Image (cartoon, rainbow, N blue to C red):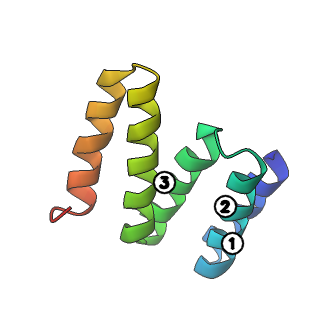
Amino acid sequence: REMFLRLADRLAEVGDEAGTDGVLKRIRALDPDDPIPHEKGLELYQRLGMKAQAVEEVLWLVRTATRQGVLGRAEELVEMASRLDPQS
């Protein structure tokens, strides 16, 4: 997983949005319940200005935090989503 995360970082650094997205999807497929790839995806999508993908990651993280009972984190993420896309 770490190698894929580093690869996603590198692809983002060189501006390869499609490559970054593909690697992140692959990481998430390996362990769909792991929040780390979603957090990393959120960070990278924000950095690349990929708002729709960033909002998708935030929503996934909100659902996960809510299921885990971490409501403060869920609230923070909802606020973040509203800043990313005020119309969402």
Residue furthest to the front in view is 67
Kind of element beneath mark 3: helix
Disc number placed over residue 22 in the picture, else none: 1
Measured Cα–Cα span from mark 1 to mark 3: 14 Å
> Can residue 86 be seen by looking at this rendering?
yes
Q: Contact (CB < 8 A) between labels 1 and 2?
A: yes
Residue 31 in the image: state x and y as whole percent.
73, 44
> Can residue 15 be seen by looking at this rendering?
no
Label located before the other in sequence (1 or 3): 1
What's the amino acid at mark 3? Answer: Leu
Kind of element beneath mark 2: helix
Residue receiving disc 3: 42
Look at 26% across and 43% down and name the residue there: 78
User: Is the residue marked by circle 1 packed among few (<14), some (14-19), or many (20+) residues within 10 Å?
Assistant: few
Whether residue 24 sits left or right of residue 85 in the image: it is right
Measured Cα–Cα span from mark 1 to mark 2: 5 Å
| Above or below 37: residue 45 | below
| Above or below 42: residue 23 | below
Of residue 39 and residue 26, the one placed in the foreground of this image is: 26
Disc number placed over residue 24 in the picture, else none: 2
| Above or below 60: residue 76 | above
Residue furthest to the right in view is 3
What's the amino acid at mark 1? Answer: Gly
Look at 63% across and 80% down and name the residue there: 18
Look at 47% across and 70% down and name the residue there: 48
What's the amino acid at mark 2? Answer: Leu
Residue 53 in the image: state x and y as whole percent.
45, 66
Q: Contact (CB < 8 A) between labels 2 and 3?
A: no
Whether residue 9 sits left or right of residue 40 in the image: it is right
Residue furthest to the top in view is 69
